[in-house]
Every structure is written in structure tokens, then in C-alpha cells.
Image: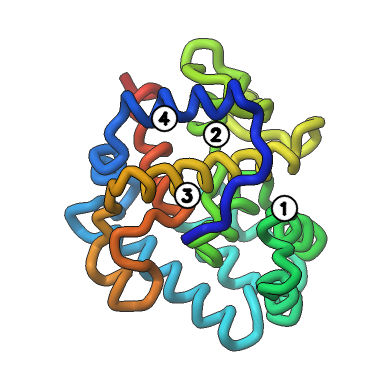
Amino acid sequence: MPHSPRNMDNSLMLDLKNFLDNNDFVAMYKSYDWGNDNFRNGFRDILDLEIQLSKSLNRQGIRLEDVKAIARWGRLRNPKRISGKEIVLDQKLLNILSDEENMLLASYPTLPLCALQESITKGIGPTYFSKILLFAFPEEYGAIDTRCVRVFGKGDLKSQQHDWINLRARNNGYGWYIPAYQADWPSGYGLWIDILRFFSEQLSIRSINCPHPSAFIQEGLRSPNMWACADVQTALFAYASSIINR
């Protein structure tokens, strides 16, 4: 079970509860479709990446090669431009962050993101920094990509449906992106994690089970029926995609 959300504005929580009342998270989760990943085939590429990063975490930490594999999965235009330290998130730091007594991840969810931004010097922006955490810590993290920002944040008046986060997406003529140089980065990502935590908690309270493909449970990557933050983000991405593609 992910950490509980930190203090959230009452009006935001009311909007989130209203969204939960009026949308079927199980159906949204099952409708996710990206590349080779869909519910019918068990999200096979997502599974492979989670297994890969889990092995890296158990050995030495997240590697630059792991980052490039995520970039290829996400269809980043030029993953060869990515450069930085060989180990972008050291296992020692991860051990400190996961210390149950310190509860650092619960109170400061952007800490590993800031460490990644120091380690990776070129080639990716906010979307892919968040995707690294998605695959490294699916229990506690989900990605913040342009589709979610366009629908749940700012920057696309045509697609915006909710005003949950102040992050803004832009289209420079070559596609949508999330600028790193905006006032609400990375704090807006921290709020996004609280939103994912909130939905995870509420779905559990309402006894709405997540229908994980069995391989995720067999590999120890998910707990039966429980919604990880990554699973909530999967559902919200599918919802955002349906809005943008309609």
C-alpha cells in the first residue's frame, strides 16, 4: 500500500472524490494501450522494464542504461543524447530514502527525482525523470506525462478537464512537452504523487480491487488487489488519452 497523501486542499479532495464517484478505475486501467502494452497481453513491456529496474536496484542502483531502455519504450526521439553518471540513483541513497524510521519518501516524494536530475545531465526532461521512478518504485510513483498535464493541469485549453495541478505543458511545433523551467516543477510532481496516493487509498477503502495481470504478482511487483501509484497513473493516463483522442 502506498504512503498516505500529505495535506491536500479540501476543494481538490472534493474534486478527486467526485472524479472517483463518476469514473470506473478498473475499466480505465484495462483500457490502457501504449505500444506493445495493453491489458490483454499483460502489459508485457512494462513488466519487463519493472523486472529490469528491480534487478538493478538489488545490485547497485539505477543505471544510465536503464534510463535509455525506458526512453526507447516511451519513444523518445533521440535516446542516444542521454548522458550522465553510470549509476544515476545509487542504492545507498535508496536505502536511506526507504528507511521506515525516517519516512523520507512519505514526506518528501521528490527527493529521488532531485537526485536523478543531478545525475542525468542531458537528454531527458520531467516526463522521463518521472518515468524512471515509475519503473523503479511502482508502489510509490507514477509518471507525469504531457497527456496527464494537458487534461489534469494546464497548457491545453482544448483538452483540459480538471485543475488538479499547476504544471503546464507546451507544444513547440514538434510535439507536447513539460518545461523543466517552470515555478511548479518539481513541486507539482510531488502534488501529482499525493493525488495518486489519494486515489490508491480511496480505492482500497471502497474495496475496488486492481485486476493486476498475474505475472506482476508472481514476480513480487504487486500485492494482490491493491492499487500501487503506478496502477492509478495507468488508469489516469488511459482517461487522459480518451479525452485527447476523441
**Circle count:** 4
**What mark, if any, has residue 146 been given in the picture?**
2
Foreground mark, 2 or 1, reads: 1
Residue 140 vs residue 61: left or right?
A: left
Label 4 crowd bin: few (<14), some (14–19), many (20+), radius 10 Å? many
Q: Nearer the viewer, residue 97 or 202?
A: 202
Work out how far the residue at label 2 is from the one at label 4, CA to CA, in angstroms: 10 Å
**Of callouts 1 and 3, the N-terminal one:** 3
Task: Depth check: give the residue in front, 107 or 28.
Answer: 107
Q: Amino acid at mark 1?
A: Thr
Identify which amino acid the numbered label 3 is placed on.
Answer: Arg
Q: Are marks 4 and 3 in contact (CB under 8 Å)?
A: no
Left or right side of 21 for 179: right
**Residue at the (37%, 50%) spot, across then down:** 204
Q: Which residue is mark 4?
A: 240
User: For numbered disc 3, what is the local secondary structure?
Assistant: loop
Residue 233, by quadrant, is: top left
Q: Position of residue 125 (x, y in %)?
A: 68, 46
Where is mark 1, residue-wise? 110
Seen at 71% across and 70% down, the residue is: 97
**Quarter containing the C terminus:** top left
Q: Which residue is mark 3?
A: 75
Q: Position of residue 77 (x, y in %)?
A: 55, 47
Residue shown at the point (52%, 73%) measured from the top left = 53
Residue beneath the point at 49% across and 61% down: 139
Closer to viewer: mark 2 or mark 4 = 4
Q: Nearer the viewer, residue 66 or 27?
A: 27
* Rendered view: 185 above or below 98: above
The percent coordinates of residue 195 (x first, y second) are: 55, 39
Which numbered disc, 2 or 1, marks the residue that appears first in the sequence? Answer: 1
Cα distance between the residues tagged 1 and 3? 24 Å
For the residues labelled 3 and 2, the Cα–Cα distance comes to 13 Å
